[in-house]
Image (cartoon, grey):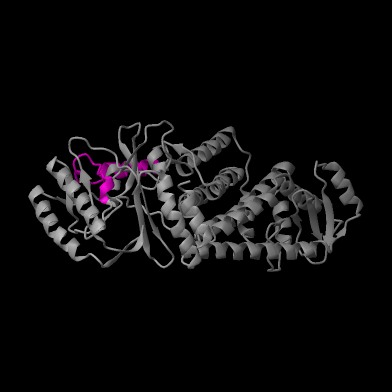
């Protein structure tokens, strides 16, 4: 899956989680939503998914199959062959039948914009975090007896520090491996009740690795900065981290402390507006939602816990998985049942899935589609075939024209510029006569393809349809100039011609060395 596919599929899951959250926010444990956001982040950052027959995409694929239009009948046999003699000089201009070009690779404008946006977002968050950390390092350790005693009562395998700073106005936690609970310099150490709420809240953040979770959320935002749904996820997931922490504190001290704890939050509402990413703190953002959520916290029943688990499993199964059909998922079957053929429109891979439907791919198995979808994307051409007498009459006229071309210059991608000689004319005539003999023996040879006499040449032997053989490649350089090579019987023969061409293009500045290497490496 590419970035766009990952982002679009995750957007569907984000919408589902937002709807579920709006309906059940005060009815289910808050960890439910953190689990759902975790599945969303996985969908955003991991470029593959698990197929499921219960996936929403499986349903969409089934609906598309039901309402798909019936494809037009293909030409006899569905496979068309270009014999070796098809690469002829002169007025007939046959080319490779592959509709898939091996073009010189370069970054598209979209990829450049996406990369620039990623770098800007990463730089912004990194700079903000570094700025905060520099300020936090100016804090002083707390030597208060209450703080020391509280740390002894709450041991953790990671070393936890309690420090004070005059740069902040509300408590916060930062650091993953060496976490620090940072308190304002004006903290009232005589109010031990509020201090226990505050320190317990921050300790829960540390135990849950919430700072690390925020880091992963930020990474997802940087990668998918162009998707507004991902920013919605970032905001709501951060809120749910605080809600889950509040819920844990209330359950730790008992529901009787809900009012007192809520008042503590209100008193700690942050007044500053500076950004402190990747840290956990008391904030005025969404304070009303937090207070309402705290007041509505109730003991989770067994039924409620089971409902939460079912909701998590169901949502992930439906929205975070891909279609069970390997064709729609882009995954080829594990066995050797894939058939390779070259049609007049594309190089095609095909296989029959478990349902008995034929699935086809035109991009070497990256994506798969039904026969109906393949026909729409690569329609079968309308072919007019040569009759023997028609081709014979054309050839008689062509012989005269070829004789008149002796001494003139011509060009083709394989040889470059060359001069027509009697020997070359005789060779061309011999090949044309071979095609005439094939037509006489029952071979179908195209006269026009989609109304055009130039471009694609298709031949088909009704008695013995055979797969297209040989290697053909069409290279497009940075100037948009096309060069066709082939067909060749072996890769080595093709590389003998392609390598010098690529080297020449690199020297001329029409192709980068990386692009040339990528083209050649595909056939080595």
Residue at image location 18% in from the left, 41% down from the top:
76
**Residue 69 part of the magenta segment:** yes
Q: Which residues are magenta?
A: 57-86
Corner quadrant of residue 277:
bottom right
Q: Is residue 304 above or below residue 367?
A: above
Residue furthest to the left in view is 389
Q: Is 143 situated left or right of 291 in this image?
A: right
Q: Position of residue 33 (x, y in %)?
A: 57, 46
* Of the pair 429 and 213, the residue shown nearer to us: 429
Corner quadrant of residue 282:
bottom right
Residue at image location 85% in from the left, 46% down from the top:
151
Q: Is residue 275 above or below residue 229?
A: below
Residue furthest to the front in view is 422
Residue at image location 64% in from the left, 65% down from the top:
124
**Residue 314 part of the magenta segment:** no
Q: Position of residue 51 (x, y in %)?
A: 45, 38
**Residue 247 in view (yes/no):** yes
Q: Position of residue 193 (x, y in %)?
A: 81, 51
């Amino acid at each position: 899956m590419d970035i766009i596919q990952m982002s679009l599929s995750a957007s569907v899951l984000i919408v589902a989680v937002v709807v579920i959250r709006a309906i059940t926010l005060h009815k289910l444990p808050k960890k439910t939503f953190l689990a759902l956001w975790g599945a969303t982040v996985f969908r955003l950052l991991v470029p593959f998914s698990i197929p499921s027959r219960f996936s929403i995409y499986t349903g969409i694929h089934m609906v598309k199959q039901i309402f798909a239009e019936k494809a037009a009948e293909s030409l006899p046999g569905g496979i068309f062959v270009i014999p070796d003699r098809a690469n002829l000089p002169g007025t007939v201009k046959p080319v490779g039948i592959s509709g898939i070009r091996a073009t010189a690779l370069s970054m598209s404008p979209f990829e450049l914009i996406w990369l620039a946006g990623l770098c800007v977002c990463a730089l912004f968050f990194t700079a903000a975090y570094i700025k905060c950390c520099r300020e936090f390092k100016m804090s002083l350790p707390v030597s208060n007896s209450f703080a020391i005693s509280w740390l002894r009562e709450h041991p953790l395998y990671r070393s936890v520090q309690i420090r004070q700073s005059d740069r902040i106005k509300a408590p916060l936690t930062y650091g993953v491996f060496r976490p620090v609970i940072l308190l304002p310099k004006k903290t009232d150490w005589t109010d031990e009740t509020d201090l226990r709420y505050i320190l317990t809240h921050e300790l829960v953040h540390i135990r849950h690795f919430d700072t690390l979770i925020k880091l992963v959320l930020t990474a997802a935002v940087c990668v998918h900065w162009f998707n507004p749904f991902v920013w919605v996820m970032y905001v709501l997931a951060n809120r749910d981290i605080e809600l889950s922490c509040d819920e844990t504190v209330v359950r730790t001290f008992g529901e009787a402390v809900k009012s007192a704890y809520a008042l503590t939050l209100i008193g700690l509402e942050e007044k500053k507006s500076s950004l402190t990413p990747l840290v956990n703190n008391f904030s005025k953002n969404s304070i009303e939602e937090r207070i309402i959520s705290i007041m509505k916290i109730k003991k989770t029943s067994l039924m409620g816990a089971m409902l939460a688990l079912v909701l998590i499993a169901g949502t992930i199964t439906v929205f975070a998985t891909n279609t069970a059909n390997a064709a729609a998922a882009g995954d080829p079957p594990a066995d050797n049942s894939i058939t390779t053929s070259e049609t007049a429109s594309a190089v095609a891979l095909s296989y029959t899935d478990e349902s008995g439907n034929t699935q086809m791919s035109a991009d070497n198995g990256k994506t798969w589609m039904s026969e109906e979808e393949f026909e729409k994307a690569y329609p079968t051409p309308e072919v007019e075939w040569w009759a023997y007498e028609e081709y014979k009459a054309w050839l008689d006229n062509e012989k005269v024209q070829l004789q008149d071309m002796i001494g003139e210059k011509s060009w083709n991608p394989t040889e470059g510029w060359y001069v027509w000689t009697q020997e070359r004319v005789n060779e061309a005539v011999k090949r044309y006569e071979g095609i005439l003999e094939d037509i006489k023996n029952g071979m179908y040879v195209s006269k026009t393809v989609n109304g055009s006499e130039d471009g694609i040449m298709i031949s088909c032997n009704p008695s013995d349809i055979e797969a297209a053989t040989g290697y053909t490649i069409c290279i497009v350089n940075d100037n948009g100039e096309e060069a066709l090579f082939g067909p060749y019987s072996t890769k080595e023969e093709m590389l003998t011609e392609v390598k010098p061409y690529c080297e020449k293009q690199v020297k001329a500045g029409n192709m980068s060395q990386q692009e040339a290497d990528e083209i050649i490496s595909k056939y080595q």
